[in-house]
Each structure stands twice: as structure tokens, then as C-alpha cells.
Image (cartoon, rainbow, N blue to C red):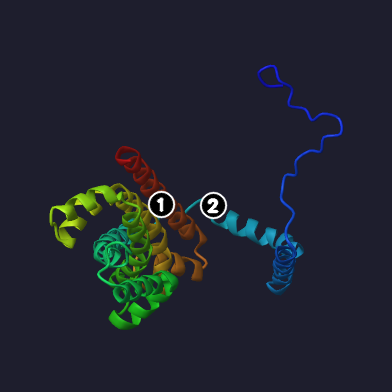
């Protein structure tokens, strides 16, 4: 009962259906998707029994990690700093390059459709190829070390930020832009005086998310020789130095947690 009026159905009155009845085509698609999921579960070897059998091994590994080995904490700290530096530099360069590309990839700001499609395709390529693949490519191109990892993060950031920057500019209110065009402002003046300032909060928000993403990615990139703490973790695991591995994992967790908390604080202050 709400406000003295009963909401219970009267006798003989049918309850409204929670979900609409799918049409035959939708029903067939649902069945096909469900069948594909079930077949995929079998093809990937999903097995609860094997998972349960592996629990003792995971427990033994966890026990061997305790207590964490702090004997190489200095080297681990420097590698962790290098990881964060890779993330920061790669994100800054990626964000800086994303802005002009996003302008060209925005339907409202691009000079013509050919440029729009070409830049959109380039951004999609950067976003589709995993950052680990870019890291392998740059390791071959420039050699082992943080430079390769920084370039991989930069490309991945362009793919991530370029798309969201372009969408943010497309959602900007047309009023200020039309007013500037009405007084004879050029396309570039309209972009820099009306579009970018209005989209800036979204730019900052996306950039901070990109930094969080880059910090996590930079750890993995070290596994293929692209610098950072990842190589330390790989060596520790290969040498069965599980105590050192525990220290590295805890260090990574603390770094990612600090970056996420600072990023969330900045977003609350800006938005």
C-alpha cells in the first residue's frame, strides 16, 4: 500500500510480466549463444576437480612465500620506481599525442570524412593490439629496457584516450561553438576556445584512469624485457625464490593502491 492506495492486483487481474517474450529470432540467438558458452567451457578444459586438486600446491606455494624476503628490498624499490616512471612518462606522452588525434577523430571537428576514418582506424589499431604485443615489438626495435616499455604504454594510452577524448568533444554543447562561428572564428579558434575547455574535465578524468591502467600494465611489460619490476618478479619465480616474489608482489600492490587512491582523490577534487 502506498499513500493509502493498495497496489495489490485485483482478483482476476494478471500480474505484469517481468521480461518481454523474445521473438523467434531473438530466441534462436539466445539458444546459440548459450550453446556456444557451454561448448567453450568444455573446449577450454574448465574443470572444478582439477582446480580442487591444485589447491594444495597453491597452499604450499603461499606457505613458501612467508615471510617475505626483504634482502633485496633496495633493488626492488628502484625497479618499482622505474616501473612508475615508465607509467608516468608513457601516459603523459600518450595523452599529449591523443589530443590532436582526437580532434581529427571527432565527427564535429575533423576537416573531412577521409581524415576521420583514417585517424579512427589508427586509434582502433592502437587500442586493439595488446600492450604486451607492442612491448615485444619495441623490444625488438629499440632493445631491452624501460624505453621499450614506455613506448608501449604511450601507444596503448593513445588507443585508450584517443577514443574517449573524441567522444567527449562530440558531446560538447554546440552553443558556444555556433556563437564563435557566427563572429567569424576559425575552426582552430573554435576548438581551442570552446570545445577543449568544455571537454577538459572529461580529459582529466580519462587521463587519470589511463595512469592507473598504465601502472598495472607496466608491471606485465617487464616480463618481456621492457623494464621495470616485472623482470624482477620473473627472475624470482624462475629461481623459485618465493620469498622475494612475495616482497615484489606486495610492493606492486602498494604502488597500484597508492596510484588508485591518489587518482580517485584528484577526480573528486576536479569533477
Depth check, front residue: 116 or 92? 116
Question: Can you see residue 72?
Answer: no
Q: Residue 66's spot in the image, x, y percent?
A: 54, 52
Q: Residue at left 33%, top 66%? A: 158
The numbered mark at residue 66 is 2
Residue 137 locus on image (x, y percent): 37, 80
Q: Is residue 252 above or below residue 29?
A: above
Residue pictured at 30% horizontal, 41% vertical: 270
**Rendered image: mark on residue 256:** 1
Assess disc 1: are there few (<14), some (14-19) or many (≥20) residues with their C-alpha within 10 Å of its C-alpha: some
Tell me if 11 is positioned left or right of 223 in this view: right
**Of callouts 2 and 1, the N-terminal one:** 2
Q: Which of 153/203 is in front?
A: 203
User: As rendered, which of 133 and 26 lies closer to the eye?
Assistant: 26
Secondary structure type for disc 2: loop
Q: Is residue 20 above or below residue 87?
A: above
Image-based side of 8 in relation to 163, left or right = right
Q: Is residue 168 left or right of residue 183?
A: right
- The residue lying toward the viewer, choosing from 174 and 103, is 174
Crowd class of label 2 (few under 14; some 14 to 19; many from 20; radius 10 Å):
few
**Above-or-below relation of 142 to 150:** below
As measured in the structure, the alpha-carbon distance from the residue carrying label 2 to the one carrying label 1 is 22 Å
| Residue 264 screen position, x and y as percent | 38, 43
- For the N terminus, which image quadrant? top right
SS for dot 1: helix
Give residue 77's position: percent from left, percent from top. Answer: 33, 56
Amino acid at each position: 500500500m502506498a499513500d493509502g492506495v493498495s497496489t495489490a492486483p485485483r482478483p482476476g487481474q494478471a500480474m505484469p510480466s517481468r521480461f518481454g517474450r523474445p521473438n523467434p529470432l531473438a530466441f534462436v540467438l539466445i539458444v546459440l549463444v548459450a550453446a556456444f558458452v557451454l561448448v567453450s567451457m568444455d573446449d577450454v578444459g574448465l574443470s572444478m576437480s582439477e582446480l580442487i586438486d591444485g589447491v594444495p600446491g597453491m597452499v604450499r606455494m603461499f606457505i613458501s612465500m612467508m615471510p617475505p624476503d626483504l634482502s633485496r628490498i633496495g633493488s626492488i624499490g628502484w625497479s618499482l620506481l622505474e616501473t612508475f616512471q615508465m607509467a608516468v612518462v608513457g601516459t603523459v606522452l600518450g595523452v599529449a599525442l591523443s589530443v590532436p588525434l582526437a580532434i581529427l577523430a571527432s565527427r564535429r571537428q575533423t576537416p573531412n570524412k577521409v581524415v576521420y576514418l583514417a585517424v579512427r582506424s589508427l586509434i582502433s589499431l592502437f587500442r586493439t593490439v595488446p600492450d604486451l604485443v607492442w612491448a615485444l615489438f619495441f623490444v625488438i626495435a629499440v632493445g631491452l629496457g624501460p624505453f621499450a616499455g614506455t613506448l608501449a604504454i604511450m601507444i596503448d594510452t593513445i588507443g585508450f584516450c584517443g577514443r574517449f577524448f573524441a567522444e567527449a568533444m562530440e558531446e560538447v554543447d554546440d552553443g558556444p561553438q555556433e556563437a564563435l562561428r557566427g563572429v567569424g572564428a576559425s575552426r582552430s579558434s573554435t576548438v581551442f576556445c570552446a570545445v577543449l575547455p568544455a571537454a577538459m574535465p572529461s580529459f582529466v578524468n580519462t587521463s587519470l584512469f589511463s595512469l592507473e591502467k598504465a601502472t598495472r600494465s607496466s608491471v606485465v611489460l617487464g616480463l618481456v624485457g621492457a623494464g621495470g619490476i616485472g623482470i624482477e618478479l620473473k627472475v624470482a619465480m624462475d629461481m623459485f625464490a618465493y620469498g622475494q616474489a612475495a616482497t615484489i608482489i606486495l610492493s606492486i600492490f602498494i604502488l597500484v593502491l597508492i596510484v588508485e587512491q591518489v587518482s580517485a582523490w584528484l577526480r573528486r577534487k576536479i569533477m
